[in-house]
Amino acid sequence: MAQTIRTRTELRVAPREVLGKKVKALRRQGLTPANIYGHNVESQAIQVATEELKHVLKSAGRNDIVYLRLDGDDPRPTFVRDVQQHPVTDAIQHIDFLQISLREKVRADVPIHLTGLSPAVDTYGGILMHGLDHVTVEALPTEVPSFLEIDVSPLTEINQALHVSDLDLPDEVTLLTDPEQVVAKVAPPAVEPVEEVPEEEELEEGEAAPEGEEGAAPEQPAEESADSE
């Protein structure tokens, strides 16, 4: 099942004159440096309120259209692309927006979500293995799914698999990924190897035990002679 139901998302942005290392001052003011780029669009430096940006990123996925309002212009349809975060604090450092045309098809990676329960896991103790986590599609920006769902309940036997061809895509969406790629598969249960403990070798009848080993007769001390008194 494809998920394409969305609400319109808008974000207010402003032109940015601060460039280079000076953008640190912007971040201290609660602003995030950003850029708009795209086909037949000149790259433009912008800035956006960090708190508003966080709210948008929580609700809008990678394939959701974000309309940017810049200086009273008509809203610009964009996709969120590169989001740079601080390696320690995860604070947003910079973000790129890809401006698009709503009348031109785009290529996009759509995430795959597994739903349901596999009977082979419950009945036979199988292990559900995840294959591809996304597929590449082509469609108009308004038709690109936010994500795709696939039910794993048909996997009733060990080694059964679901493939890209099993995904349910809208007619308006063209699949570009190999349809034979595995999306999910039930692997046999893991069996822990049992370590064999070697048994002690038994001595044959009449065979003497090596010196010092258990079962060997202790050596008797020599008797003192009468001359030694």
Image: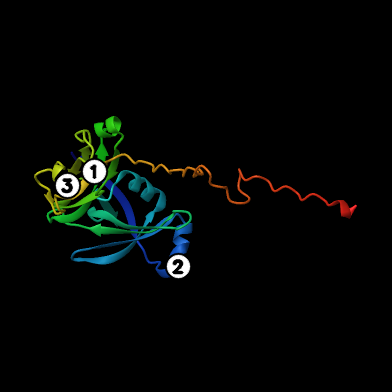
Q: Secondary structure at mark 1?
A: strand
Per the rendering, the mark at residue 184 is: 1
What is the three-letter code of the residue carrying label 2? Lys
- Number of marks in the rendered image: 3
Between the residue at mark 3 and the residue at mark 1, the CA separation in whole angstroms equals 9 Å
* Tag 2 residue: 22
Residue 106 position in % (x across, y down):
16, 56
Between the residue at mark 2 and the residue at mark 1, the CA separation in whole angstroms equals 48 Å
Location of residue 226 with respect to 186 vertically, above or below: below
Per the rendering, the mark at residue 164 is: 3
Query: Mark 2 or 1 closer to N-term?
Result: 2
**Which residue is at the far right?**
229
Q: In which quadrant of the rendered image does the N terminus lie?
A: top left
| Residue in the image at 28% along x and 40% along y | 188
Query: Mark 3 or 1 closer to N-term?
Result: 3
Q: Secondary structure at mark 3?
A: helix
Residue 103 position in % (x across, y down):
12, 54
Q: Is residue 8 visible?
A: no
> Residue 52 or 109: which is nearer the viewer?
109
| Residue in the image at 33% along x and 55% along y | 13
Q: In the image, which is nearer the foreground, mark 2 or mark 1?
A: 1
What is the three-letter code of the residue carrying label 1? Ala
Q: Residues within 10 Å of mark 3 (few under 14, many from 20)?
A: many
> Residue 45 or 72: which is nearer the viewer?
45
